[in-house]
Image (cartoon, rainbow, N blue to C red):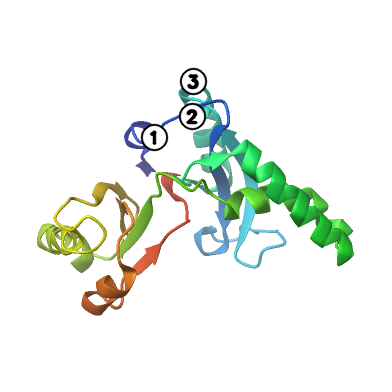
Amino acid sequence: MVNNFEQIRELLQFRSNDDFYFLQILQRKKDAKEGQKVNGTNNNSRLIKAYYIKSIEQYDFIEKEVIGLCDLFNARAGINLNRRSFRNNAFQLQMHIASMMMNEHYDKMHKAYSSVVGKYKSDTDKKWIIDLDGEEENTFDFIYGIDDTLRGLQPNVGEPKTICRILSKSGSHLITSPFNKAEFKKIYPKIDIQSNNPTNLYIP
């Protein structure tokens, strides 16, 4: 079991009523227990529930519910640490719905808001994920080497870019500020960098 509620709580910042964070509970096919069916429109996962977190109080309030749903469905909860804007997403939603109507995708309208929220983050305070998988990539020396490499990359050469390390069942996510991806890939070509993906909140 992986529970990162307490650690992630310290990373959430709400500047106004327009700010929110996007949290999803997903039941993945590769996590399914023997005999368990995962039925959904996505071939790889099924959305159990989505949350739009507007405050620390709401985050604390839903913790037990999120854990309960994950345990019940053998699903995992992930939260995108890139803040969202209700206002900006409302404008994006209008354009997305217009596009869906032009293409006559009326049967998919109920998914429109979650789809837009998943794509469009705020322009400030960006957080990226360096996805470390397996024992070799999660040794102290390996992680220290990545942190040292990040300090030497643009922008802000010499300043730390690693914010924290979030654990998963098979490895971890390094949460960082943005950096020069091309230069990083020259040193670590096989490591995945994610600029707008959720990190692990709870995994049964």
Q: Residue at x 86, y 67 (%)?
A: 103
Side of 46 where 21 appears, left or right: left
Side of 38 where 149 appears, left or right: left
Q: Which residue is mark 2?
A: 63
Q: Could you tell me which quadrant the N terminus lies in?
A: top left
Q: Secondary structure at mark 2?
A: helix
Q: Is residue 191 above or below residue 93?
A: below
Of 204 and 134, the residue lying toward us:
134
- Under mark 2, the amino acid is Glu
Q: Is residue 114 above or below residue 152?
A: above
Residue 183, position in %: x, y? Answer: 26, 73
Q: Which residue is mark 1?
A: 5
Q: Quadrant of residue 29?
A: bottom right
Q: Secondary structure at mark 3?
A: helix
- Under mark 3, the amino acid is Glu
**Mark 2 to mark 1: distance in Å?**
8 Å
Q: Which residue is mark 3?
A: 57
Q: Answer whether labels 2 and 1 touch (C-beta < 8 Å).
A: yes
Q: Quadrant of residue 134?
A: bottom left
- Of the image marks 2 and 3, the number of the one nearer the N terminus: 3
